[in-house]
Image (cartoon, coloured by chain):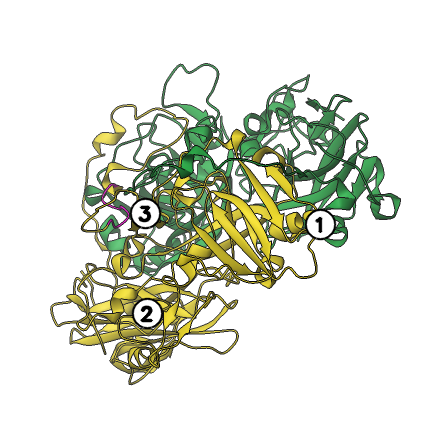
Chain colours: A green, B yellow
Amino acid sequence: MARTTGNGGEDERVAGGGLLHRRAFLATGALSMGALGTIARGGTPPASMAAPGGPLSGYGARASASDTIQRRLPARIDFPGTGSSRTPLDRLEGTITPNGLHFERHHNGIPDIDPLAHDVLVHGLVQRPLVFRYEDLLRYPMESRILFLECSGNSGALNAVKPAQVDAGRLNGLLSCAEWTGVRLSTLLDEAGLLPEARWVQAEGADASGHVRSIPLDLCLDDALIALFQNGEPIRPEQGFPMRLFLPGIEGNASVKWLRRLKLMAKPAYSREETSKYSDLLRDGRAELFSLRMGVKSVILKPSLGLDLRGPGYQEISGLAWTGRGRIRSVEVSADGGKSWAEAALTEPVLSKALTRFRIPWQWDGGPATLMSRATDETGATQPLRADWLAKYAPGQGYHNNSIQSWHVDAAGRVSHIYA
Amino acid sequence: MARTTGNGGEDERVAGGGLLHRRAFLATGALSMGALGTIARGGTPPASMAAPGGPLSGYGARASASDTIQRRLPARIDFPGTGSSRTPLDRLEGTITPNGLHFERHHNGIPDIDPLAHDVLVHGLVQRPLVFRYEDLLRYPMESRILFLECSGNSGALNAVKPAQVDAGRLNGLLSCAEWTGVRLSTLLDEAGLLPEARWVQAEGADASGHVRSIPLDLCLDDALIALFQNGEPIRPEQGFPMRLFLPGIEGNASVKWLRRLKLMAKPAYSREETSKYSDLLRDGRAELFSLRMGVKSVILKPSLGLDLRGPGYQEISGLAWTGRGRIRSVEVSADGGKSWAEAALTEPVLSKALTRFRIPWQWDGGPATLMSRATDETGATQPLRADWLAKYAPGQGYHNNSIQSWHVDAAGRVSHIYA
C-alpha cells in the first residue's frame, strides 16, 4: 500500500488537486512520493525453478494471464465481419499497438487474398495505366514510419446525452499506432505519369463492400504510402493484407485496405462512404465533406474507468495524445475539473502523426477529483470543450469528436466517465 | 521485370559497382531507375469482392501466406527449452520486431509464472530489503523506449573457417527491437536505499537455470528498466513475463528474464554465466570479463542469402545498424567488396540504442558484386574487418562479433555468404 511520507508536498505542486511538477518523481526519489515496496521476509524459491520450462517456438504467444486483453467487440453483431473492434487502450502501455490488437473497421468482412495473385491498378487520368503486382512492389524503395491510425467515428459516444460508463478502450479504441513500411504512393503515380487535369485519386479495396474513397491528389503526392508491413511483419488480413493505402494523419477509412485500384480523376466521385457516411453534418444544415484530417486529441488512460485507484498517495497519470497535423506540442492535465492545469511530460521521441505518451505525477489526497487532459499541436490547435464541439455540429453527428474528456474519481478511488 | 531507361546513369553514381546517391530515387523519379509496373489490361473483380469476408476477432492472427515467417529454430534440439530461436530479419521490414518473432535465448526453458504471485526482492547492501509485487510495480511511474536487444553470441557463425551458407536471420537473428515500457530500476534501488559499499547488482531469474548475472551498479543507476510491457502489451513468456530486467545497449543475457531478485554487492559473484560463459577469451590467453556493452554493427538484409535478385536494374539495398553506445552516425555501403563506399540514408528517427534502418539505391549491371555495410556510431567507433576482429580473440571465441559482413551476388542474381 502507498505510504505518504517526506515532502511530496506543496513546493512540488504545480496545479490544484495534487498535480506535481512533471519531473517531481525523478527529482525527489520514490520515498517522498509514497513508496510501494514492502519489507522483505524469508521465502522459498518458486516452483518455476524446480523443473525445466517450456520450449522454443517459431511464433510466440502471450501469457495466458494476458488473455483478458482483447479487442473490444460490439455488444451485438448482426453481420460478423461488418463493424468494428477496438484497441483496449486502457490495458496497454507505451505507444506501439501490437498487431493482434490493432483496431478493426470493416464494411463487409475481411477478404482472404492470395498475395501472389494480387495487384493494384493505376488508371484514369494517367499517361499510361499500370498494374503493380505485390511481388513487384516488394522490390521498390521502402519507407518506414511510426504512425497512428484513427477512425473518424472514434469517441462518437461522447455525443450521448449521458456519459457512457464504458472503459477508455470502448470510448476511444478506434485508434492504434504501428511502424508502417511501404512504398511511397507518389512513386507509383510518377511511374504512371499524371495528366494535367488529375486532381483526385479514387482508391478501391478488394473487399465485398467495394469500399471506395476519393482523396485529394495533394495528399497522395505528400506522404501517402502503399503499406506492406506493420511492426516489421507483413500487414495483417484485418489491416489490408497484402497491401493498404496509408494516409498519415487522415481518417482511417480513407486508408483503403486490400487496395486494388487507384483511379486518377478530375473531381471526387461522391461515393456513398463520402456523402451519406464520413461527412459531418453541421448545425446550420450544411455538411463538411472530405473533412479528412484528424484533429488534435488526448485521452487519460491511467487512471480510467475500470482501473480504480487502490488508495490515496502517489499515482502516475498517463495517457496518449496525437494530431493529424504533425507533432504534439504540449499536453496539460487538470485534477480539479479544468480550474487549473499542469503540463505533462511527453515521452521522446515526439513523432509527427504518431501517438505520444504523456505522464504526470499526482499526489491524490483521497477526495473526489475530476481528471482532464488537453493537447495542443505544433500548429497551435488545441482540443475544444465538449460543449463548444457540440455547438458546431448537428445533433447526432459523431465524426471527428476531439473534445476534452473527463474522468471522475470518487473518495473510494472508483473512476467514472463524466461530462465536466 | 525491371527496365533500365532514362538517366539512372553516371551522374548519380557515388561509388563503384553501381551504388547511387542515397536520395537518387526520390530526386529522379521511378522511370529513370527502372520501373516495374506493367501495362494494364482488362480484368474482372476478384472473388473476394463477391461474398462477405471474415469476422471481427478479439486478438488477430497473421495471413496464412505469412506463416512461413517463423523464428529460426536450431537444427537439433536436445533440450526443448534450452538454446535459442532467431528473428527472421531477412523476412521483416522496418525496425520493430513483432512480439511473436522476438528472438529467444533460454538457459532451461520458459517458466510459467502467475503474475499475481510474483514479486522481486531487493536485498544485500541496502538500508531496507524490500519486496515489490507485480501489481505494485504497475502503479509506479513508467518509462517507454524503443530499444534493441542482442545476444552476445549473435553472428558467432562468422568464426567458422568457411562462410556458413545460411540466411541473415540464422546468422544475425539473435537481435530484435521493441518498444519497452517499465519502471526505472534506480527508482527501486532508491527506495531500498543503497549502502555506500554497494558496487554491483546480482540479478536472478525465476527460471529453472537460476540464471544470475552481476551487473555494475553504474549501469543499474543509468537507464536500466524493470520492463513490464513490450510493444504495448504485457511482455511475453519468452521475454520474461511478468517482468524482466532491461539494460539498454547491453548483451541480452544480462537483461535477466522472469526477474525475482536483485542483490546489492561490493564485488561481482563470478557466477558460471560470467566466467565460463559470456566472457571473451583473448589471443594472449587472458579473458575479458563483463564485456557487457554491444559494439557498433550493421547487416544488409535486402538482398541477402535466400533473397536472390530477379534481374539487372534498379534494386534497393537495405539493412539494419545499431550500437550499444548510443546513436548510429552513418552507414556506408560498398558494392565492390570494400574498394569504394557510399553513404546510405538512415530512416528517422535515429534513436539511441535502437535499430536504425538504412537504405541506398543500387543500379545492378548484372555482373558479380560483393555487398558490404559498415556502421559508425556517435562515439566514432566503426565496425572492424573480420580479419582484425579475429586477430584479437582466441580461436573459437564467438562473443561480440561485430565485424563487417559480405554478401556475394553472382551473374544469375544468386546471393551467397562470403568472407571478403
Q: Is residue B346 above or below residue A46?
A: below
Please identify, in this view, whether the residue under mark 3 or under mark 2 is nearer the observer. 2
In this orientation, which residue lies closer to the viewer: A365 or A150? A365
In this orientation, which residue lies closer to the viewer: A210 or A378? A378
Is any part of residue B419 visible from this angle? Answer: yes
Amino acid type for the residue under numbered disc 3:
Gly
Amino acid type for the residue under numbered disc 1:
Gln
Helix, strand or loop at mark 3:
strand
Measuring 68% from the left and 47% from the top, which residue is drawn there? Answer: B192
Q: CA distance from mark 1 to mark 3?
A: 75 Å
Magenta stretch, residue numbers: B67-73
Q: Are marks 2 and 1 in contact (CB under 8 Å)?
A: no
Q: CA distance from mark 3 to mark 2?
A: 30 Å
Amino acid type for the residue under numbered disc 2:
Pro
The percent position of residue A45, horizontal first and vertical second, equals 48, 37
Q: Which mark is residue A124?
A: 3
Residue that carries the numbered disc 2 in the rendered image: B361
Q: Is residue A328 above or below residue A163?
A: below
